[in-house]
Amino acid sequence: MGPAVIFIFMAIFMRSCEHKFETLENYGQIKPFIYTDISGTKRSSSEFEGDIVLITTIQESCLDSCSILLWNINQMIYQKIWKNRTKKRKRIRILSLVTDGYGNPSDQLSEVEAILKNMVPNYDPTIWILAQGDAKSIYDIKHNGAQLIQDGIQFQELMLLMDKKQCLRMVLSGKREGHIRRMEQSMALLQKEYDKANFKKKK
């Protein structure tokens, strides 16, 4: 997986969810960020307010060399998002920052989009968004004395779950099938949290 500090960081983030699958912890606001979409338009993370967003990286070298398991993320997460795409209250997006493999921004968005179109049935660029942006800055998160991003490129293996208020709710490895499955469960828990809140409002 990478340096021991990432294991420590992930253990801190996962600890509260290990034995009590009721609600996800809130680890604070993700810093606002700017990214460029595949059309060349600069956009702001503020546009995701009201959406649940799974943030990953994706490399221009995929499929030969990927930091995340694309096939598993497609099968376990994206296809379920796509099936629920018409349900506004269940709106989820995947934002994948395209990097050169070393964590630096890449401008090869069209090439990566061609890969996704070829391997992902029902690929929808409004659901699975490819972006050019400073992934290192977005992943530069500290919690309880642990820092998510260190020297090296291992941070690219991680998935971040951002809630509707732009807060970080889960960090898991996108390189492990079991963690991808767990992320899908975490997303479902987050949806239940909002469903309960909506139910209470109606009562």
Image (cartoon, grey):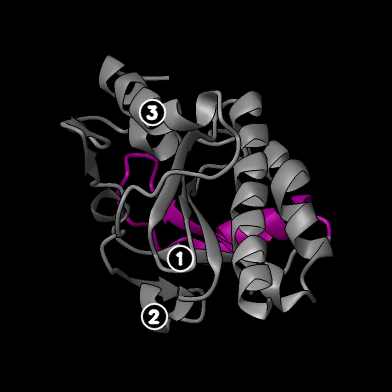
* Residue hosting label 3: 10
Circle 3 Cα neighbour tier, 10 Å, few/some/many (<14 / 14–19 / ≥20): some
Which quadrant of the rendered structure holds the N terminus? top left
Mark sitting on residue 66: none
* Residue hosting label 1: 131
How far apart are labels 3 and 2 at the CA level?
A: 29 Å
The kind of residue on which mark 3 rests is Met
Residue appearing at x 26%, y 62% in the figure:
31
Residue appearing at x 68%, y 50% in the figure:
188
Asked if the residue at tag 2 contacts the one at tag 1, i.e. Cβ–Cβ closer than 8 Å, the answer is: yes
Asked if the residue at tag 2 contacts the one at tag 3, i.e. Cβ–Cβ closer than 8 Å, the answer is: no
Residue appearing at x 47%, y 74% in the figure:
48
Which quadrant of the rendered structure holds the C terminus? bottom right
* Residue hosting label 2: 43
Which mark is first along the chain, 3 or 1? Answer: 3
**Residues rendered magenta in the picture:** 93-121
Instruction: Please name whichever residue, 203 or 119, is drawn nearer the observer in this view of the structure.
Output: 203
Drawn side of residue 176 relative to residue 121, left or right? left
* Magenta span includes 94: yes
Tag 1 secondary structure: strand
Instruction: Please name whichever residue, 149 or 125, is drawn nearer the observer in this view of the structure.
Output: 149
- The picture quadrant where one finds residue 129 is bottom right
Instruction: Please name whichever residue, 83 or 25, is drawn nearer the observer in this view of the structure.
Output: 25
Which callout, 3 or 2, points to the residue nearer the camera? 3
Say whether residue 31 is visible.
yes
Which mark is first along the chain, 2 or 1? Answer: 2
**Outermost residue, top direction?**
4
Tag 3 secondary structure: helix
